[in-house]
Amino acid sequence: MSDHEHHAATVNGTVVSRDRVNALLEAVPARDHEARPEAFARAERQRRRWATQVVVVDELARQACARRGLSGPGLNPGTAPPRGATSHDGAAPDEQRTVTASPAELGSIVAVALAHSPAARTLLEQLEREQLIPEEALYDYYDRNRDRFLTPEALSRGADPFSETSDLLPYDQVREGIAGELRRAAGHRAFFDWLDQARADVVYAPGHEHPGDPSHPDHEHRH
């Protein structure tokens, strides 16, 4: 059997085995297809490409966590789980997460990777902690979104949040909540920026290309 028959992709010199992709495919069952056999076969080819992307994100995140010295279960780069594994190893679902939708309905590959990969979640949490939100940005958010900070009494009488500052919860009372929300948003942007750069040099084996790669006949661009 050739190397391409053994692996789905190479990530910074680390081989991502087909076993890891197969484990995810088994953990995320396909929906029943009533389409013609050729349409079903096309959907399955695309599902394999989709699953490869999820596993690649997991591998990239494992490597990033290792470089940053982040520890935790399921963070060992290059670990290939046994076929059909349902633990966190190899990007199969941990905490018994179950997804039964088709790839198109699952939405973003990143969202699914975060649901299945402890390493991706660990990295995202670290990136969120690293975000420093200036005080002026916090207050600006508070000032521009007054409708979110009306007191219960003001809400009950339908007060205009932009007319009376006395109808608002005090800034000091809601500041930490605003900071957390803005850190999470900034952390997600940082995660996407990291991923765009990290997967630029990933090499895919035939049949495991990105679902939107125009070089294969089944390509479709979905997020």
Image (cartoon, rainbow, N blue to C red):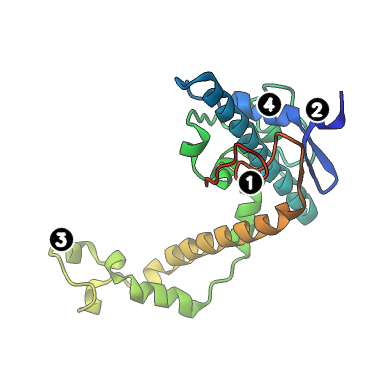
> Dot 2 lies on which element?
helix
Q: Which of marks 4 and 3 is in front?
A: 4
Q: Mark 2 points at which residue?
A: 5
Amino acid at circle 4: Asn
* Residue at figure coordinates x 47%, y 76% from the top left: 137
Amino acid at circle 3: Ser
Classify mark 1: residues with Cα within 10 Å, few (<14), some (14-19) or many (20+): few
Q: Measure how far apart labels 3 and 2 are at the Cα level.
A: 65 Å
- The disc placed on residue 22 is 4
Q: Name the residue under label 1.
A: 214
- The disc placed on residue 156 is 3
Q: In which quarter of the image is the N terminus?
A: top right
**Looking at the image, can residue 62 be seen?**
yes
> Dot 1 lies on which element?
loop
Amino acid at circle 2: Glu
Q: Measure how far apart labels 1 and 4 are at the Cα level.
A: 24 Å
Please tell me which of labels 4 and 3 falls first in the chain: 4
Residue 20 position (above or below residue 83):
below
